[in-house]
Amino acid sequence: MRRNTGFFVLLGISLLVPLIAMTLIPLADTSEPRYAEIARLMYESGDWITPWFAPGNPFWGKPPLSFWLQAASMHLFGPTEFAARLPSWLVTVITLGLLYRCCATLFNATTARLAVLIYATSALSFISSGAVLTDPFLALGTTLCMTGWIMAANSSKVFWRYSFFIGLVVGLLAKGPLILVLSGGAIVLWMLFYPQARRTTLSLPWAKGIALTILLSAPWYLAAEIKTPGFLNYFFVGEHFLRFIDPGWEGDLYGTAHKAPFGTIWYYWLQASFPWGFAGLVILMKGLLQTTQRTKMRQYLSDPRLGYFLAWSLFTPLFFTVSGNILWTYILPSLGGFSICLAYAWPKSSTKQYSASEKTSFATRAAGPTFLAMIAPSAIVALIVVVSYTPQLLKTEKLLVQHTRTTGPSDIPLYYLDEVPFSARFYSFESAKPLKEHEIINKMNSGQNFWLAVPKNRLESTETRFNQPVFATKQHNLYLINSPGQYELTARAKQTHLNDPITQ
Protein backbone atom coordinates (compact mmCIF):
# COMPACT_ATOMS: atom_id res chain seq x y z
CA MET A 1 0.00 0.00 0.00
CA ARG A 2 2.83 2.35 0.88
CA ARG A 3 4.43 2.12 -2.55
CA ASN A 4 1.14 3.22 -4.15
CA THR A 5 0.78 6.30 -1.94
CA GLY A 6 2.06 8.53 -4.76
CA PHE A 7 -0.69 7.30 -7.06
CA PHE A 8 -3.45 7.97 -4.56
CA VAL A 9 -2.07 11.44 -3.76
CA LEU A 10 -1.89 12.39 -7.44
CA LEU A 11 -5.30 10.96 -8.21
CA GLY A 12 -6.76 12.72 -5.18
CA ILE A 13 -5.34 16.04 -6.35
CA SER A 14 -6.64 15.51 -9.89
CA LEU A 15 -10.15 14.89 -8.52
CA LEU A 16 -10.15 17.49 -5.75
CA VAL A 17 -8.96 20.47 -7.80
CA PRO A 18 -11.94 20.37 -10.24
CA LEU A 19 -14.31 20.14 -7.24
CA ILE A 20 -12.80 23.34 -5.82
CA ALA A 21 -12.69 25.05 -9.22
CA MET A 22 -16.33 24.34 -10.01
CA THR A 23 -17.29 26.34 -6.92
CA LEU A 24 -14.88 29.27 -7.28
CA ILE A 25 -14.76 29.87 -11.04
CA PRO A 26 -17.92 31.43 -12.54
CA LEU A 27 -19.60 30.09 -15.66
CA ALA A 28 -17.93 31.74 -18.64
CA ASP A 29 -19.63 32.27 -21.99
CA THR A 30 -20.64 30.58 -24.12
CA SER A 31 -20.88 26.78 -23.86
CA GLU A 32 -20.94 26.28 -20.10
CA PRO A 33 -23.68 28.76 -19.18
CA ARG A 34 -25.70 27.78 -22.26
CA TYR A 35 -25.96 24.17 -21.10
CA ALA A 36 -26.32 25.24 -17.46
CA GLU A 37 -29.25 27.47 -18.34
CA ILE A 38 -30.95 24.69 -20.30
CA ALA A 39 -30.64 22.51 -17.20
CA ARG A 40 -31.85 25.35 -14.96
CA LEU A 41 -34.94 25.82 -17.12
CA MET A 42 -35.62 22.08 -16.85
CA TYR A 43 -35.22 22.31 -13.07
CA GLU A 44 -37.49 25.35 -12.89
CA SER A 45 -40.19 24.15 -15.28
CA GLY A 46 -40.28 20.49 -14.29
CA ASP A 47 -40.36 19.57 -18.00
CA TRP A 48 -38.20 16.45 -18.21
CA ILE A 49 -38.99 15.64 -21.85
CA THR A 50 -37.97 18.72 -23.80
CA PRO A 51 -34.82 20.70 -22.98
CA TRP A 52 -35.49 24.39 -23.61
CA PHE A 53 -32.92 26.71 -25.19
CA ALA A 54 -34.96 29.63 -23.92
CA PRO A 55 -38.54 29.88 -22.68
CA GLY A 56 -40.70 28.85 -25.64
CA ASN A 57 -37.72 27.73 -27.75
CA PRO A 58 -37.01 23.96 -27.60
CA PHE A 59 -33.43 22.76 -27.72
CA TRP A 60 -33.12 20.04 -30.35
CA GLY A 61 -29.33 19.94 -30.42
CA LYS A 62 -28.71 17.31 -27.73
CA PRO A 63 -30.60 14.54 -25.91
CA PRO A 64 -31.43 15.21 -22.25
CA LEU A 65 -29.25 12.88 -20.15
CA SER A 66 -26.80 15.55 -19.02
CA PHE A 67 -29.64 18.02 -18.45
CA TRP A 68 -31.56 15.45 -16.41
CA LEU A 69 -28.63 14.92 -14.08
CA GLN A 70 -27.78 18.62 -13.85
CA ALA A 71 -31.41 19.53 -13.11
CA ALA A 72 -31.54 16.77 -10.47
CA SER A 73 -28.35 18.18 -8.95
CA MET A 74 -29.98 21.62 -8.82
CA HIS A 75 -32.88 20.12 -6.89
CA LEU A 76 -30.33 19.03 -4.29
CA PHE A 77 -27.96 21.99 -4.21
CA GLY A 78 -29.89 24.84 -5.83
CA PRO A 79 -29.35 26.44 -9.27
CA THR A 80 -25.63 27.14 -8.86
CA GLU A 81 -22.58 26.56 -10.99
CA PHE A 82 -21.46 23.82 -8.58
CA ALA A 83 -24.73 21.93 -9.03
CA ALA A 84 -24.52 22.26 -12.82
CA ARG A 85 -20.93 21.00 -12.94
CA LEU A 86 -21.09 18.20 -10.37
CA PRO A 87 -22.60 15.51 -12.69
CA SER A 88 -19.64 15.84 -15.07
CA TRP A 89 -17.29 15.14 -12.18
CA LEU A 90 -19.31 12.12 -11.07
CA VAL A 91 -19.43 10.51 -14.52
CA THR A 92 -15.69 11.13 -14.89
CA VAL A 93 -15.10 9.22 -11.64
CA ILE A 94 -17.23 6.35 -12.98
CA THR A 95 -15.24 6.41 -16.23
CA LEU A 96 -11.99 6.16 -14.26
CA GLY A 97 -13.37 3.17 -12.34
CA LEU A 98 -14.26 1.37 -15.57
CA LEU A 99 -10.83 2.02 -17.06
CA TYR A 100 -9.11 0.76 -13.95
CA ARG A 101 -11.09 -2.46 -13.68
CA CYS A 102 -10.73 -3.28 -17.37
CA CYS A 103 -7.01 -2.53 -17.53
CA ALA A 104 -6.25 -4.32 -14.26
CA THR A 105 -8.08 -7.43 -15.48
CA LEU A 106 -6.44 -7.57 -18.90
CA PHE A 107 -2.95 -6.41 -17.90
CA ASN A 108 -2.07 -5.59 -14.28
CA ALA A 109 -2.88 -3.18 -11.47
CA THR A 110 0.22 -1.04 -12.00
CA THR A 111 -0.65 -0.38 -15.63
CA ALA A 112 -4.24 0.29 -14.60
CA ARG A 113 -3.19 2.92 -12.05
CA LEU A 114 -1.03 4.71 -14.56
CA ALA A 115 -3.84 4.61 -17.17
CA VAL A 116 -6.26 6.15 -14.68
CA LEU A 117 -3.76 8.90 -13.85
CA ILE A 118 -3.15 9.66 -17.54
CA TYR A 119 -6.87 9.97 -18.27
CA ALA A 120 -7.60 12.01 -15.15
CA THR A 121 -4.85 14.57 -15.87
CA SER A 122 -5.07 14.89 -19.66
CA ALA A 123 -6.08 18.46 -20.43
CA LEU A 124 -9.50 17.77 -21.92
CA SER A 125 -10.69 15.11 -19.49
CA PHE A 126 -9.40 17.14 -16.54
CA ILE A 127 -11.16 20.33 -17.65
CA SER A 128 -14.38 18.59 -18.69
CA SER A 129 -14.60 16.82 -15.32
CA GLY A 130 -15.45 20.18 -13.78
CA ALA A 131 -17.39 21.77 -16.64
CA VAL A 132 -21.00 21.87 -17.84
CA LEU A 133 -20.64 19.87 -21.05
CA THR A 134 -22.35 16.90 -22.66
CA ASP A 135 -19.05 15.32 -23.72
CA PRO A 136 -18.19 13.59 -20.39
CA PHE A 137 -21.47 11.70 -20.68
CA LEU A 138 -20.65 10.54 -24.21
CA ALA A 139 -17.19 9.55 -22.95
CA LEU A 140 -18.84 7.48 -20.22
CA GLY A 141 -21.07 5.78 -22.79
CA THR A 142 -18.10 5.04 -25.06
CA THR A 143 -16.06 3.71 -22.14
CA LEU A 144 -18.92 1.43 -21.10
CA CYS A 145 -19.19 0.12 -24.66
CA MET A 146 -15.49 -0.42 -25.20
CA THR A 147 -14.62 -1.90 -21.82
CA GLY A 148 -17.83 -3.94 -21.86
CA TRP A 149 -17.10 -5.56 -25.22
CA ILE A 150 -13.64 -6.82 -24.37
CA MET A 151 -14.46 -7.63 -20.74
CA ALA A 152 -17.44 -9.74 -21.82
CA ALA A 153 -14.92 -12.05 -23.48
CA ASN A 154 -12.75 -12.15 -20.35
CA SER A 155 -15.24 -12.14 -17.49
CA SER A 156 -18.40 -14.06 -16.68
CA LYS A 157 -19.97 -11.26 -14.63
CA VAL A 158 -23.42 -10.19 -15.77
CA PHE A 159 -22.51 -6.49 -15.67
CA TRP A 160 -19.81 -6.85 -18.30
CA ARG A 161 -22.05 -8.88 -20.58
CA TYR A 162 -24.56 -6.02 -20.65
CA SER A 163 -22.34 -2.97 -20.16
CA PHE A 164 -21.84 -2.60 -23.92
CA PHE A 165 -25.59 -2.09 -24.32
CA ILE A 166 -25.78 0.11 -21.23
CA GLY A 167 -23.10 2.24 -22.87
CA LEU A 168 -25.20 2.51 -26.01
CA VAL A 169 -28.14 3.74 -23.93
CA VAL A 170 -25.95 6.33 -22.17
CA GLY A 171 -24.53 7.53 -25.48
CA LEU A 172 -27.92 7.66 -27.24
CA LEU A 173 -29.37 9.74 -24.41
CA ALA A 174 -26.27 11.92 -24.05
CA LYS A 175 -25.34 12.71 -27.67
CA GLY A 176 -27.30 10.47 -30.03
CA PRO A 177 -26.34 7.83 -32.61
CA LEU A 178 -22.74 9.07 -32.66
CA ILE A 179 -22.12 6.46 -29.96
CA LEU A 180 -22.86 3.73 -32.53
CA VAL A 181 -20.24 5.16 -34.88
CA LEU A 182 -17.47 5.80 -32.35
CA SER A 183 -17.72 2.49 -30.50
CA GLY A 184 -18.80 0.30 -33.43
CA GLY A 185 -16.20 1.82 -35.74
CA ALA A 186 -13.37 1.18 -33.31
CA ILE A 187 -14.44 -2.44 -32.81
CA VAL A 188 -14.74 -3.06 -36.56
CA LEU A 189 -11.30 -1.50 -37.10
CA TRP A 190 -9.87 -3.86 -34.47
CA MET A 191 -11.43 -6.91 -36.08
CA LEU A 192 -10.05 -5.95 -39.48
CA PHE A 193 -6.48 -6.19 -38.19
CA TYR A 194 -7.07 -9.02 -35.72
CA PRO A 195 -9.39 -11.55 -37.41
CA GLN A 196 -9.12 -13.91 -34.44
CA ALA A 197 -10.91 -11.27 -32.35
CA ARG A 198 -14.14 -11.73 -34.28
CA ARG A 199 -15.16 -14.54 -31.99
CA THR A 200 -15.66 -11.94 -29.22
CA THR A 201 -19.01 -11.17 -30.82
CA LEU A 202 -20.24 -14.44 -29.32
CA SER A 203 -19.70 -13.12 -25.79
CA LEU A 204 -22.58 -10.61 -25.86
CA PRO A 205 -26.30 -11.36 -25.36
CA TRP A 206 -27.37 -9.64 -28.56
CA ALA A 207 -31.14 -10.24 -28.48
CA LYS A 208 -31.62 -9.20 -24.88
CA GLY A 209 -29.04 -6.40 -25.17
CA ILE A 210 -30.65 -4.81 -28.23
CA ALA A 211 -34.06 -5.10 -26.60
CA LEU A 212 -32.70 -3.39 -23.49
CA THR A 213 -31.15 -0.61 -25.57
CA ILE A 214 -34.41 0.11 -27.43
CA LEU A 215 -36.50 -0.13 -24.27
CA LEU A 216 -34.39 2.42 -22.39
CA SER A 217 -33.63 4.92 -25.17
CA ALA A 218 -36.45 4.91 -27.74
CA PRO A 219 -39.28 6.20 -25.47
CA TRP A 220 -37.63 9.57 -24.97
CA TYR A 221 -37.06 10.07 -28.72
CA LEU A 222 -40.71 9.31 -29.45
CA ALA A 223 -41.94 11.55 -26.62
CA ALA A 224 -39.71 14.41 -27.77
CA GLU A 225 -41.02 14.22 -31.35
CA ILE A 226 -44.63 14.08 -30.18
CA LYS A 227 -44.17 17.08 -27.91
CA THR A 228 -42.18 19.23 -30.37
CA PRO A 229 -42.71 17.93 -33.94
CA GLY A 230 -39.68 18.34 -36.18
CA PHE A 231 -37.17 17.27 -33.57
CA LEU A 232 -36.24 13.94 -35.18
CA ASN A 233 -35.58 15.48 -38.60
CA TYR A 234 -33.41 18.26 -37.23
CA PHE A 235 -31.54 16.01 -34.83
CA PHE A 236 -30.77 13.08 -37.11
CA VAL A 237 -30.47 14.82 -40.49
CA GLY A 238 -29.08 18.18 -39.36
CA GLU A 239 -27.01 17.49 -36.28
CA HIS A 240 -25.65 14.10 -37.32
CA PHE A 241 -25.36 14.31 -41.11
CA LEU A 242 -25.25 17.87 -42.40
CA ARG A 243 -23.07 19.07 -39.52
CA PHE A 244 -20.50 16.37 -40.38
CA ILE A 245 -20.35 16.80 -44.16
CA ASP A 246 -20.81 20.60 -44.33
CA PRO A 247 -18.18 22.69 -42.47
CA GLY A 248 -20.26 25.83 -43.06
CA TRP A 249 -23.62 24.29 -42.20
CA GLU A 250 -26.03 27.20 -41.80
CA GLY A 251 -28.92 25.19 -40.38
CA ASP A 252 -27.66 25.34 -36.79
CA LEU A 253 -30.48 26.82 -34.72
CA TYR A 254 -28.37 27.46 -31.65
CA GLY A 255 -25.01 28.81 -32.75
CA THR A 256 -22.66 28.95 -35.68
CA ALA A 257 -20.83 26.28 -37.61
CA HIS A 258 -17.20 25.61 -36.72
CA LYS A 259 -15.12 25.80 -39.88
CA ALA A 260 -11.73 24.14 -39.74
CA PRO A 261 -9.45 22.63 -42.39
CA PHE A 262 -9.64 18.86 -42.77
CA GLY A 263 -7.23 17.18 -40.39
CA THR A 264 -7.53 19.84 -37.69
CA ILE A 265 -8.79 17.15 -35.32
CA TRP A 266 -5.20 15.95 -34.89
CA TYR A 267 -4.14 19.38 -33.66
CA TYR A 268 -7.08 19.19 -31.27
CA TRP A 269 -5.83 15.76 -30.23
CA LEU A 270 -2.54 17.31 -29.13
CA GLN A 271 -4.46 19.87 -27.10
CA ALA A 272 -6.87 17.37 -25.59
CA SER A 273 -4.23 14.81 -24.63
CA PHE A 274 -1.71 17.38 -23.34
CA PRO A 275 0.79 16.77 -21.86
CA TRP A 276 0.56 13.01 -22.30
CA GLY A 277 0.10 13.12 -26.07
CA PHE A 278 3.57 14.58 -26.56
CA ALA A 279 5.02 11.89 -24.30
CA GLY A 280 3.25 9.26 -26.39
CA LEU A 281 4.70 10.73 -29.58
CA VAL A 282 8.21 10.60 -28.10
CA ILE A 283 7.73 6.93 -27.23
CA LEU A 284 6.36 6.24 -30.72
CA MET A 285 9.28 7.97 -32.45
CA LYS A 286 11.70 6.08 -30.24
CA GLY A 287 10.03 2.82 -31.20
CA LEU A 288 10.19 3.65 -34.91
CA LEU A 289 13.77 4.86 -35.00
CA GLN A 290 15.49 2.18 -32.89
CA THR A 291 15.78 -1.29 -34.37
CA THR A 292 15.41 -3.13 -31.06
CA GLN A 293 12.41 -1.02 -30.12
CA ARG A 294 10.77 -1.66 -33.52
CA THR A 295 11.06 -5.39 -32.95
CA LYS A 296 9.56 -5.08 -29.48
CA MET A 297 6.78 -2.85 -30.79
CA ARG A 298 5.80 -5.45 -33.40
CA GLN A 299 5.72 -8.08 -30.69
CA TYR A 300 3.53 -5.93 -28.47
CA LEU A 301 1.13 -5.14 -31.32
CA SER A 302 0.67 -8.84 -32.01
CA ASP A 303 -1.35 -8.88 -28.78
CA PRO A 304 -5.01 -8.31 -29.77
CA ARG A 305 -5.69 -6.74 -26.37
CA LEU A 306 -3.29 -3.89 -27.04
CA GLY A 307 -4.61 -3.64 -30.60
CA TYR A 308 -8.11 -3.19 -29.18
CA PHE A 309 -7.17 -0.14 -27.14
CA LEU A 310 -5.12 1.25 -30.00
CA ALA A 311 -8.17 1.00 -32.30
CA TRP A 312 -10.25 2.72 -29.59
CA SER A 313 -7.76 5.58 -29.32
CA LEU A 314 -7.35 6.09 -33.08
CA PHE A 315 -10.80 5.66 -34.59
CA THR A 316 -12.37 8.88 -33.28
CA PRO A 317 -9.68 11.26 -34.64
CA LEU A 318 -9.54 9.23 -37.87
CA PHE A 319 -13.30 9.57 -38.25
CA PHE A 320 -13.27 13.35 -37.73
CA THR A 321 -10.25 13.87 -39.99
CA VAL A 322 -12.58 14.41 -42.95
CA SER A 323 -14.90 16.78 -41.07
CA GLY A 324 -14.31 20.50 -40.74
CA ASN A 325 -17.20 21.24 -38.37
CA ILE A 326 -15.44 20.06 -35.23
CA LEU A 327 -14.46 21.02 -31.68
CA TRP A 328 -11.58 19.82 -29.52
CA THR A 329 -14.06 18.17 -27.14
CA TYR A 330 -14.78 15.58 -29.85
CA ILE A 331 -11.54 13.85 -28.83
CA LEU A 332 -12.73 12.99 -25.31
CA PRO A 333 -14.36 9.58 -26.11
CA SER A 334 -11.02 8.29 -27.42
CA LEU A 335 -8.85 9.30 -24.46
CA GLY A 336 -9.71 6.17 -22.49
CA GLY A 337 -8.12 3.93 -25.09
CA PHE A 338 -5.14 6.27 -25.45
CA SER A 339 -4.57 6.26 -21.68
CA ILE A 340 -4.38 2.48 -21.54
CA CYS A 341 -2.07 2.31 -24.59
CA LEU A 342 0.32 4.85 -23.11
CA ALA A 343 0.27 3.24 -19.67
CA TYR A 344 1.13 -0.09 -21.30
CA ALA A 345 3.93 1.39 -23.43
CA TRP A 346 5.52 3.70 -20.86
CA PRO A 347 7.63 1.21 -18.85
CA LYS A 348 8.38 -0.89 -21.94
CA SER A 349 9.96 2.11 -23.67
CA SER A 350 12.57 2.44 -20.93
CA THR A 351 15.99 0.88 -21.38
CA LYS A 352 16.50 0.65 -17.61
CA GLN A 353 16.22 -2.83 -16.16
CA TYR A 354 14.18 -3.30 -13.00
CA SER A 355 14.13 -6.08 -10.51
CA ALA A 356 11.07 -8.31 -10.16
CA SER A 357 9.92 -6.43 -7.05
CA GLU A 358 10.34 -3.04 -8.72
CA LYS A 359 8.16 -4.02 -11.68
CA THR A 360 5.13 -4.31 -9.40
CA SER A 361 5.64 -0.87 -7.92
CA PHE A 362 3.67 2.07 -9.19
CA ALA A 363 6.32 4.42 -7.85
CA THR A 364 8.92 2.86 -10.13
CA ARG A 365 6.84 3.28 -13.27
CA ALA A 366 5.30 6.63 -12.33
CA ALA A 367 8.44 8.50 -11.31
CA GLY A 368 8.48 10.15 -14.76
CA PRO A 369 4.70 10.69 -15.13
CA THR A 370 4.45 12.48 -11.75
CA PHE A 371 5.59 15.77 -13.28
CA LEU A 372 3.21 15.44 -16.23
CA ALA A 373 0.31 14.54 -13.95
CA MET A 374 0.72 17.80 -12.01
CA ILE A 375 0.59 20.13 -15.02
CA ALA A 376 -3.20 20.30 -15.46
CA PRO A 377 -4.04 20.62 -11.71
CA SER A 378 -1.34 23.27 -11.29
CA ALA A 379 -2.71 25.26 -14.23
CA ILE A 380 -6.24 25.23 -12.79
CA VAL A 381 -4.99 26.26 -9.34
CA ALA A 382 -3.17 29.17 -10.99
CA LEU A 383 -6.38 30.07 -12.84
CA ILE A 384 -8.34 30.07 -9.57
CA VAL A 385 -5.82 32.48 -8.03
CA VAL A 386 -5.80 34.78 -11.06
CA VAL A 387 -9.60 34.85 -11.34
CA SER A 388 -9.92 35.59 -7.63
CA TYR A 389 -7.92 38.79 -8.08
CA THR A 390 -8.94 39.74 -11.63
CA PRO A 391 -12.40 38.29 -12.36
CA GLN A 392 -12.73 40.60 -15.39
CA LEU A 393 -10.44 38.24 -17.31
CA LEU A 394 -13.31 35.76 -17.76
CA LYS A 395 -16.17 36.24 -20.18
CA THR A 396 -18.80 36.03 -17.45
CA GLU A 397 -21.60 38.31 -16.38
CA LYS A 398 -21.94 36.89 -12.86
CA LEU A 399 -20.49 39.90 -11.04
CA LEU A 400 -22.42 42.36 -13.20
CA VAL A 401 -25.71 40.68 -12.42
CA GLN A 402 -24.80 40.56 -8.73
CA HIS A 403 -23.97 44.28 -8.82
CA THR A 404 -27.44 45.14 -10.11
CA ARG A 405 -28.98 43.14 -7.26
CA THR A 406 -26.87 44.61 -4.48
CA THR A 407 -26.75 48.24 -5.60
CA GLY A 408 -29.90 50.30 -5.24
CA PRO A 409 -33.48 48.97 -5.30
CA SER A 410 -33.73 45.32 -6.30
CA ASP A 411 -36.66 45.94 -8.65
CA ILE A 412 -34.66 47.97 -11.19
CA PRO A 413 -34.75 45.93 -14.42
CA LEU A 414 -31.57 44.85 -16.23
CA TYR A 415 -31.29 45.10 -20.01
CA TYR A 416 -28.51 44.11 -22.39
CA LEU A 417 -28.05 46.02 -25.61
CA ASP A 418 -28.73 43.68 -28.57
CA GLU A 419 -28.60 40.28 -26.82
CA VAL A 420 -28.26 38.74 -23.39
CA PRO A 421 -25.17 36.52 -22.84
CA PHE A 422 -25.86 33.03 -21.59
CA SER A 423 -24.07 33.68 -18.31
CA ALA A 424 -26.33 36.68 -17.67
CA ARG A 425 -29.39 34.57 -18.43
CA PHE A 426 -28.24 31.92 -15.95
CA TYR A 427 -27.27 34.24 -13.09
CA SER A 428 -30.29 36.52 -13.53
CA PHE A 429 -32.70 33.55 -13.80
CA GLU A 430 -33.87 34.91 -17.19
CA SER A 431 -34.80 38.31 -15.71
CA ALA A 432 -32.18 40.11 -17.85
CA LYS A 433 -33.78 41.08 -21.17
CA PRO A 434 -32.43 42.20 -24.56
CA LEU A 435 -32.95 45.78 -25.69
CA LYS A 436 -32.49 47.07 -29.23
CA GLU A 437 -30.89 50.44 -29.76
CA HIS A 438 -34.04 52.06 -31.13
CA GLU A 439 -35.87 51.03 -27.96
CA ILE A 440 -33.52 52.88 -25.62
CA ILE A 441 -35.23 56.25 -26.04
CA ASN A 442 -38.66 54.88 -25.14
CA LYS A 443 -37.20 53.28 -22.05
CA MET A 444 -35.61 56.59 -21.12
CA ASN A 445 -38.91 58.38 -21.61
CA SER A 446 -40.59 56.08 -19.14
CA GLY A 447 -38.98 58.04 -16.34
CA GLN A 448 -37.90 54.95 -14.44
CA ASN A 449 -34.36 53.87 -13.76
CA PHE A 450 -33.03 50.77 -15.49
CA TRP A 451 -29.70 49.05 -15.81
CA LEU A 452 -28.22 48.86 -19.31
CA ALA A 453 -25.24 46.63 -20.15
CA VAL A 454 -23.56 47.80 -23.35
CA PRO A 455 -21.01 45.69 -25.26
CA LYS A 456 -17.69 47.50 -25.22
CA ASN A 457 -17.35 47.08 -28.99
CA ARG A 458 -20.64 48.97 -29.44
CA LEU A 459 -19.82 52.05 -27.35
CA GLU A 460 -18.64 54.12 -30.32
CA SER A 461 -21.47 53.13 -32.66
CA THR A 462 -24.48 53.82 -30.43
CA GLU A 463 -26.43 57.07 -30.68
CA THR A 464 -26.36 57.36 -26.92
CA ARG A 465 -23.04 58.50 -25.52
CA PHE A 466 -22.50 56.89 -22.16
CA ASN A 467 -20.26 58.40 -19.52
CA GLN A 468 -18.46 56.64 -16.70
CA PRO A 469 -19.86 53.12 -16.21
CA VAL A 470 -20.88 52.02 -12.74
CA PHE A 471 -19.47 48.54 -13.36
CA ALA A 472 -17.60 46.70 -16.09
CA THR A 473 -16.89 43.14 -17.14
CA LYS A 474 -14.59 41.87 -19.85
CA GLN A 475 -17.22 42.48 -22.53
CA HIS A 476 -19.78 44.93 -21.11
CA ASN A 477 -20.06 48.29 -19.41
CA LEU A 478 -22.98 48.77 -17.03
CA TYR A 479 -24.91 52.05 -16.78
CA LEU A 480 -27.80 53.16 -14.61
CA ILE A 481 -30.02 54.94 -17.11
CA ASN A 482 -32.12 57.95 -16.03
CA SER A 483 -29.60 58.46 -13.27
CA PRO A 484 -27.97 61.94 -13.68
CA GLY A 485 -24.62 62.01 -15.46
CA GLN A 486 -24.76 58.48 -16.79
CA TYR A 487 -25.38 59.29 -20.45
CA GLU A 488 -25.97 61.97 -23.04
CA LEU A 489 -27.69 61.84 -26.42
CA THR A 490 -26.17 62.55 -29.79
CA ALA A 491 -27.78 65.30 -31.87
CA ARG A 492 -29.77 62.77 -33.89
CA ALA A 493 -30.90 60.97 -30.76
CA LYS A 494 -31.87 64.29 -29.11
CA GLN A 495 -34.10 65.11 -32.08
CA THR A 496 -35.73 61.66 -31.82
CA HIS A 497 -36.16 62.25 -28.12
CA LEU A 498 -37.85 65.67 -28.62
CA ASN A 499 -40.18 64.34 -31.32
CA ASP A 500 -41.35 61.42 -29.23
CA PRO A 501 -45.03 61.94 -28.30
CA ILE A 502 -44.33 60.89 -24.73
CA THR A 503 -41.97 63.83 -24.16
CA GLN A 504 -44.33 66.42 -25.60
Image: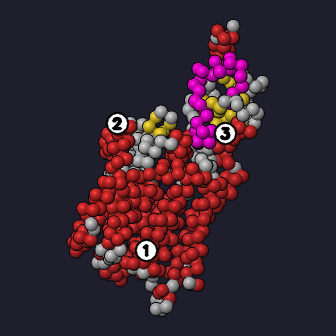
Q: Nearer the viewer, residue 309 or 293?
A: 309
Residue 64 seen: yes
Instruction: Report x, y in % for residue 31.
Output: 51, 46
The disc labelled 3 sits on which kind of residue?
Answer: Val
Q: Is residue 403 above or below residue 93?
A: above
Within 10 angstroms of label 2, few (less than 14), some, or many (20 or more) residues?
Answer: few
Residue picked out by circle 1: 101
The disc labelled 1 sits on which kind of residue?
Answer: Arg
Q: Nearer the viewer, mark 3 or mark 2?
A: 2
Q: Are marks 3 and 2 in contact (CB under 8 Å)?
A: no
Q: Gap between marks 3 and 1, in whole Å?
A: 46 Å
Instruction: Report x, y in % for residue 173.
Output: 39, 52
Within 10 angstroms of label 3, few (less than 14), some, or many (20 or more) residues?
Answer: many
Badge 1 marks a residue whose secondary structure is: helix
Residue 481 drawn in magenta: no
Using residue 184 as the reference point, say whether residue 138 is left or right of it: right
Q: Gap between marks 2 and 1, in whole Å?
A: 42 Å
Residue picked out by circle 2: 230
Q: Which residues are magenta?
A: 424-452
Q: Gap between marks 3 and 2, in whole Å?
A: 35 Å
What residue appears at the point 42 percent right and 37 percent down from the top-left corner? 253
Badge 3 marks a residue whose secondary structure is: helix
Residue picked out by circle 3: 401
Instruction: Report x, y in % for residue 199.
Output: 22, 72
Q: Is residue 392 above or below residue 337?
A: above
Within 10 angstroms of label 1, few (less than 14), some, or many (20 or more) residues?
Answer: some
